[in-house]
Image (spheres, coloured by chain):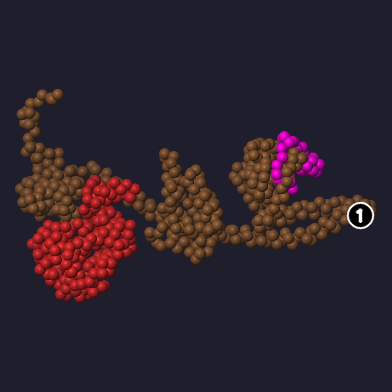
Chain colours: A red, B brown
Amino acid sequence: MESMVKRNNVKVIGKGDQVILFAHGFGCDQQSWKYIVDAFTDDYRVVLFDYVGSGKSDLNQYDSVKYGNLNGYAEDVLDICEALELKDIIFVGHSVSSMIGLLAAIKEPTYFQKLVFIGPSPRYLNDADYTGGFERTDLESLFEFMDSNYLGWSSALAPAIMGNPDRPELGEFLTDSFCSNDPVIAREFAKVTFFSDNRADLSKLRIKSLTLQCSDDIIAPLQVGNYVNKHISNNSLFIMRATGHCPHISEPEETIRAIKAFI
Amino acid sequence: MSLQVDKNLLDALIDTETLYQEAPCGYVSLLPDGTIIKLNNTLLTWLNYTTKSLLYKKKFSDLLSKGGKVHFEMFFKPMITVRGHIKELSYEILKKDGSVLPVLLSAKAMKDALGSVMAINMAVYDITDRKSYEVELLKAKKTAEDEKRTFQFLADLIPEMIWTANADGDIDYVNQRFVQYFNLPERNFNLSSVASRIFKEDRKKFLNAWRESIRAGTDLHIEIRLDNYQGNSEWHLIKAVPYINQDGLVTKWFGSCISTEEHIMALKAKDDFISIASHELKTPITSLKGTLQLMDKIKNNHPDPLLHKMIDRANRNVNKTISLIDDLLNVSRINEGQLYLNKKRSVIFDLINDCCSHIKYETGYDILIEGDSSIEADIDEGRIEQVIINFINNAIKYAPESKLIEVGYEKNGQHVKIEVTDKGPGISPEKLFHLFERYYQVKNNSSGNAGLGLGLYICAEIIKKHNGKIGVKSELGKGSTFWFTLPANM
C-alpha cells in the first residue's frame, strides 16, 4: 500500500464513511481540486492522487507502454482502490479522467457506487456522424504549443524540465509548480487523451452516473455531453452556467452544488 | 549625500497613461471568462485591430488558433486561477490579416477579498525573433532525436552486446542483445546486478581491471566468463574505451562484450588434440632416437661414407623432431598448470656462458656477454637456459645477417634483468604486441619456416612462473632486444 501512496502521491483527508475519489484531468494534478474539496471533508472521506507522470507522483514509475492507453491510467485508479481497500466509492473525474473512471468501473464495478463526469468526452476527434470538436490539425497545433512552451521561454513550465535528480534545489521549484509536468510524459498523456476513442465503452457502464457539462467548453462541447448522456444508461446530464473546461476551478460553488445534489 | 532633483520635472516626464498606451509591451485585461475589457495602443498596433472591434466583444481566446485555444483553456485558465499569476507562456496571437504574432504572456489575477478572480491583467511580449530561433532549436532537437533512434536501432541490430557507462563506470545504456543475454526486464532493471552475472572466479579480476581503467582512463581489454540467462557461463572479450571530451576529461565509456566462447572452445579442442598427439608421438620417437644412437656408435664398423652421412642426418632430424614435440608437451603442461620449477641459487654468468658456448660452437655466431659475474639468482636453471637459448636462436633465425649478438645482464634493485640484442631488421610495432601469444608466427622471414609459434609463449610462461617480467623492444632497421627479469631472491 505504501508503494501505491508514493507512486500516486495519494492523500486521504476528511471524516465520514463514504469515500469520494477525485481524479484530476490532463495537464494538472490533485491541486486542481483545492477549491471544492473543503466542501466535502466534513461528511466524506476524500481521496486525492496524481496519475503517474503528473504532479508529485513517482516519475520513475512511468512506463510508456502501460500508459500508452487509458486502461493503464484506469489501472492506477483500481490499484488505489485495492490498496486502500475502498468499496462503493463516489468517483469524480475531470476531463479525461471521466473516461478513465468509466473504464475502471466497467472492469471492477464493485469498487464504485456513483460516477461524476466533469466535461467528459469519449472521442475528441470528429468522425463520420460524430462531432468531437477537433480536427487532426487542431491537435497537432496543440502539441506544437505544448512543445514550444516546454522548450522555449516559459519559466512557468521550465522547472519541470529542470527536475534533475542531480540538482535537488531545482526540484524545490516543482513543489510549487501547479501544472508543471514532465514535458515528454505530458506530450504522451496528451496524445493518449486526445486520440482515444471510448464511444463503444459507454454502453457497458452499469453504475449510476452524472455528466456535468459546461455551457461554453471548446474541449468538450455540448454535443459531446449530449452524446455521452444518450449512450450511457442511467446517466443524468446537468448543463452548468460555468463556462470553459474547468468549472471546479472557475465556478467551484456551482460545481459543489451540482455534485452534492447528485450524491 | 543626496542628489538635487526637480521632482516636478521628473514626474512630468513620465505620464502614466502614455506609459500604458505606448509601453514597449502589449497590455490587455480580461474578465475571468476571457472577455477583453481593456488593451493598450502597442498591442492594437501590433495586431492592426481597432479598440472598437475588440473591446467587450471578443474573448482573448478568439485571437488564438484552435491549438492555442485548447492550451489556453487547459493550462492558462487553471493556472491563473490557482496560482494567481503566470510567467511567460508562449502563444501565437492572430493579427487582423490572419498572420500570427508569436508572443510570451505573463499575467496576474486581480482577486476580491474572498479570493475570487475579478479580472486578469496580461503583459504581451513580441518574440518574433526569438521564435524563429526557437523553431531552429526544435528542429535541431528533432534531428538529434532522430539520430538517437537511428543509433539505437543500429545498436540493437548488432548481434553482440554493447553498452555505455558514465565517467564513474556506472552502466547507463545497454543494447537489446545485452538485455537478451542476461534476460533482464525491459525497463527499470538494476544494472549493478549485472556484476553478479560475471562468473564467480572472474569477478574480482574483472572489477580490478575495470577500476584500474577508470582510474587511469585507459582502454579495458579482458576475457571473462558471463553467466547467461540459463545460468551457463560463456567466455567473452570485454572491451571499453574512454570518450574524452574537448576539455580532455573522460565523460563516457563505450564498451562491448564479444562472445569468444566458440573461439575458446576451438582452442581447447586444439590443445587437447596437441596434448594427446604429442604424448603418443613421444614414446616411439624416443625409441627411434635410442636406435639411431646405437647405430651412430657402430657406424665406424662400416666403411661406406654415405651410411655415415645418412646416420648423421637422421640423428639431426630426430633431435629436431624431439625438440618440437617437447615444445608441444611443454605447452600441454602449461595449459594443465603442470609447469613445475626446480629452483636453486645460480650464478647468472655461468648459466649464460654455458648456453652461448654451445651455440657458438654449433653456428659460428659471435656472442658477446656483458655483466657482473658475481650476480646470482634463485632459478630453475634448465628452464631459464631454455629461455636464453630460445632468445638467441630467434636472433639467429630472424636476424641472420646480424653476426654479433649481445647478451647483457644486470642487477637492478631486487631484480636481475637479462637482455638479448641483435642488429637485425627489427620487428614492426603491430607484431610486437602478439609475439608472446600462443601459436603466433612471424611471417615473411627469410628463413621461410616459421615454426610452431610456441617458443616465446613457453618462455613467457616460464618467466611468469618465476614471478618475472618478459618483453621486447624493437626498431625497424636497427634491431631488437628481448628481455626478461627475475627476482634476485626467492
Q: Is residue A169 visible?
A: yes
Q: Which quarter of the image is occupied by the C terminus of chain B?
A: top right
Please name the residue that numbered disc 1 is placed on.
B298
Quadrant of residue A125 in the image?
bottom left
Chain bearing tag 1 is B
* Closer-to-camera residue (B437/A173): A173
B464 part of magenta stretch: no
Q: Which residues are magenta?
A: B354-382
Three-letter residue code for mark 1: Ile
Q: Is residue A150 visible?
A: no
* Closer-to-camera residue (B165/A230): B165
Which residue is at a point 30% across and 48% down the rendered structure image? Answer: A168
Residue A224 appears at what percent x and percent y? 16, 66
Quadrant of residue A71 in the image?
bottom left
Which residue is at a point 90% across and 53% down the rendered structure image? Answer: B297
Q: Is residue B309 left or right of residue B132?
A: right
Residue lying farthest front? A15
Q: Is residue A75 left or right of residue A228?
A: right
Which residue is at a point 28% across and 53% down the rendered structure image? Answer: A183
Q: Which quarter of the image is occupied by the N terminus of chain B?
A: top left
